[in-house]
Image: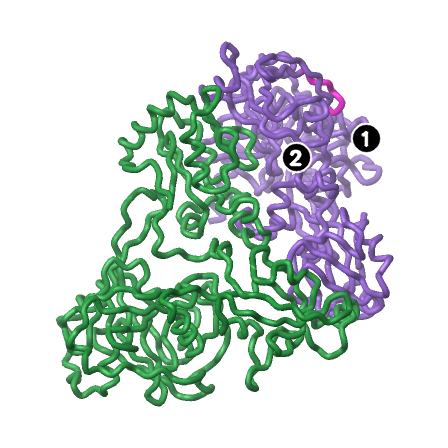
Amino acid sequence: MSFRCLLTAALAGLLFTFPASAQDAKPTPDKSMMRVNITSQGHHFQLPWQKMNPGTRRGLGALLPGNRVLVTAELAQDAIYVELELASSGRKLVSKVEAVDYELNLATIVPAADPGDFFNGMMPLEIDSKLKPKATLSVWQFENNGEPVTSPIELHRADIGGYFLEEQFFLIYQANGAVQYRAGTFTLPVVHDGKLAGMLIRYNSRDQVADLIPPQMIDRFLNDAALPPYEGIPNFGSKTGQTLDPQLRKFLKLDGIEGGLLVTAVTPGFSAELSGVKEGDVLLEINGNKLDSRGYYNDPELGLLASSHLLRGGAKVGDTVKLKIFRDGKPMDLDCKMLRRNPSDYLVDPYMFDRGPRYLILGGLLFQELTLNYLQLAGREWRERAPFRLLYAQTNQDEFLKQGRKKLVFLSGVLPAPGTVGYERLRQLIVTKVNDKPINDIKDLAEALKAPIDGIHKIEFNDHPKLIHVDAAQAEQDNKEFLPARYRINKLQRLE
Amino acid sequence: MKQSLRLSVPALAAVLASGPLAFSQEKTEGPATSSLGAQYEAIVNIECNSVEADYQTPWNPATPGGGTGTGFLIGPNLFMTNAHVVSDASRLSIRKVGDPTPYRAKVKFIAHDCDLAILELLKPAKAFENVKPLVLGNEVPKLDTTVKVIGFPIGGERISVTRGVVSRVDYQGYTHSGVDQHLAIQIDAAINPGNSGGPVLQDGAVIGVAFQGYSGDVAQNTGYMIPVPVMKRFLKDVEDGSYDRYVDLSIAHFEILNPAQRKALKLPDDDAGVLVSNVDGDGSCWNLLNPGDVLLAIDGHTIESNGSIDIDGEQMEMAEVVERKFAGDKLKLRVWRGGKQEEVEITLKNTEHYLMAAHKYEQRPQYVTFAGLVFQPMDSPLMAAHSPTNLRTRYYFQYFSNDALYKQRPQPVIFTSVLPDSINAYAREFTGQIVDEINGVKILRLKDADEALKKDPEGGFITVKLLGEGRPIVFDKTAAATAQKRIMAKYGVDEPSYIE
């Protein structure tokens, strides 16, 4: 077994490596790529006062100018301890995450302190901004022993696809070719003509198709990170539907007009709504690009692409996007100022890394702000199995935001304590009021709990049992004595 | 909680595979029937040929099926059995021990909420003339006393007797309706498919009807029987010639075990009372009780803080008082409200909307088709047949009673499926959602959809708006009219709609 492994490794080395000495001027894997070892520790979303078991992952990063190493955010998530490692010598350098964008699935790693001579002899990669279709790219990897391995792939087409998080779709490049995975890494740098041409984020070994984060998305991430504050990707804030159905087109009076996307919902307070887009409008053009009835446009360089690219990955926060819409039988122009919707702007945070959920414990009653991570505790089929009320709130967030809620505070469970007798079975109840004050986020809850009524906290839910009472003095005592002693919980709240 | 409970009547297919036909040649001679006691003569085998409604293609005739169970003579030509043995019956046959003749019978009364039914022979039969009906016992048997279960379970053709002890007396979900809970008695005698509807005897009297059990991989030696109080209530209910269902307080309550709860509600420190958490908007207590009230006593019985009451020295759930009452009966409640005691009198009734989640029987599926779109009213078999994933649809089904959604939409109409045709080529992705409006008319019931679709709309388009969906489904009026006939012919839909 070990003999066979050795043989294939040697063979691959023979085929794909080129000696470092042959071409000193050109970046090579051993000079422009390094290993990145990241120990990460996520937060526990069920028991929010504690963290999960730490785990270490190894990946490969592309060396960029300024002793900066580019990796995927997936690798860098919840990083606690970061090392850069030279593949050839195995030398390690304590480092840190400099910038991370989980939506774009990119992060930069920099040394934690003065790197000394660690980067001596290394050669940073520039970004290739002039990639052409059919270009032959090279996927870079290392063998276990540090020998470089390169696999050629051919750039095939551009598309809009998922990066890492659910429902985040951006520009991807697809390339064809055989890539042999080494040392189970997350992401691989892809190089063209000595320049960084992308990061490979997915590979389908059966069809031999690789999905890459393309250079322009890497570029925009680096430019954004270079000028703090980090802006991120803007959001348009609408739902749209295709207009292929000829009967629908006739109904919408679109005779003689080509293409268009029907706006079926608009999120209150975001780019689309603020610029005057309404449900029922038909989006005909974005920045002069005509949309077809599937919602695609013909990009002069990249071909047919989903128009979401023009409103997200292809736009910047603060940009004004020119929209041509069709309303009541007439075309109309709108200027749309692109805003960003941060995870914290949602009723239910769509993702959460590097921090735990906000929570508060009252004598054993555990209150939390709902996150998608919490719903996903129900497993792979969380959309079927997550607690229904919470799932419904997550899916219909805008309805709750319109009611004035900022976050969804819920009683996630009860730790049996002297003051929680009779409440042990309560869980996953949405909190409406505490001590007669409406609760729109966890801070409201903390504030409301400062004013018990006659020494008793009155807590109201949207569902059975609707109303419970907790003795304020008993809860405080349990917080101080019982919970630390019996459950070893010392951190009773996280409000920030 | 009782999801693993299953009905103990086998499907006909199972009977054919493992029952009489498969084993008939190897059967050994058993004892002559004449040697059995007289009471066995009153215990009969019931064969039910049934039809199963098809909620996926609701215009189709029902699919034939069936099963067997047990019953027992309770009066001249009258037999008691389980509702689930005879539900959806197309033909019922009764066989007596030692007599191969099938006697045709019909359902005289059926109570799906407590899984009991009374059958009557179509023609009085000589064979039963001299058979003495079984005697109904008086009470709930004591724990650890022996009982006998008699019936025609799987494993052979002849009558079977098993014996066990009373293991537990408690409230149980009755799986036949899926939404009802009544008193049930757990016994450790084997109850198997086919035993259903059979008598459970003690000292020569019927003290229960065997009705459900767990499948072997969940729990063993646990069978359940319907006890005498439930049987007696059924018999009394049908005295007037029809069955009127159980009545209910239609409230949710919460135990007051926490001292702070008691203090905040200014309740005396006597461990009495439960907190009212929800009052059904259509139920017996609507406008008479409010969430936040504390129920102190029901019909003169003090309610403990865990919701139990004392009846004749036995601890019972407070629902037991209501279990023994009938529609129109009055009931006195003692309520703690705003720091004071009040007496409230309610008139008991049952609600229709809680049946949304119940299994349905003897029901022909209703539907409306239009241009290949199929609309059906939301109910439990529909949800089972189509399993819509749309969250709003699931919300309406699950919280129909709890959130009083019936007040906005008494019979939510679901766009369930599409019979594919050129006219509806772009409608398929919208199935599984609730219909909000058709041609601007709110759709509260299936009838509304039927009427709205029959009217001539202004502007040449028929528009179907789904709840929470911004993209309407639109049909060209003239094209839709021709498509309707074409689609019905192509897919074998004889009637464009069926509405009761």
Is residue B143 in view? yes
| Residue drawn at point x = 34 percent, y = 56 percent | B362
The chain under label 2 reads A
The residue that mark 2 highlights is A105
Task: Identify the magenta region.
Answer: A317-322
Q: Which dot marks residue A229?
A: 1
Residue type, mark 2 in image: Asn
Residue type, mark 1 in image: Pro
Of residues A158 and A63, the one nearer the viewer is A158
| Position in image of residue B128 (x %, y %) | 19, 78
| Position in image of residue B200 (x %, y %) | 35, 80
| Position in image of residue A475 (x %, y %) | 81, 66
Q: Secondary structure at mark 1?
A: loop
Marked residue nearer the N-terminal end (1 or 2)? 2
Q: Quadrant of residue A240?
A: top right
Would residue A341 appear left or right of B231 to someone viewing this image? right
Residue A10 lies, with reference to residue B303, above or below; the image says: above
The chain under label 1 reads A
| Residue drawn at point x = 40 percent, y = 27 percent | B425
Disc 1 from disc 2: Cα separation: 18 Å
Q: Residues within 10 Å of mark 2 (few under 14, many from 20)?
A: many
**Which colour is chain A painted?**
purple
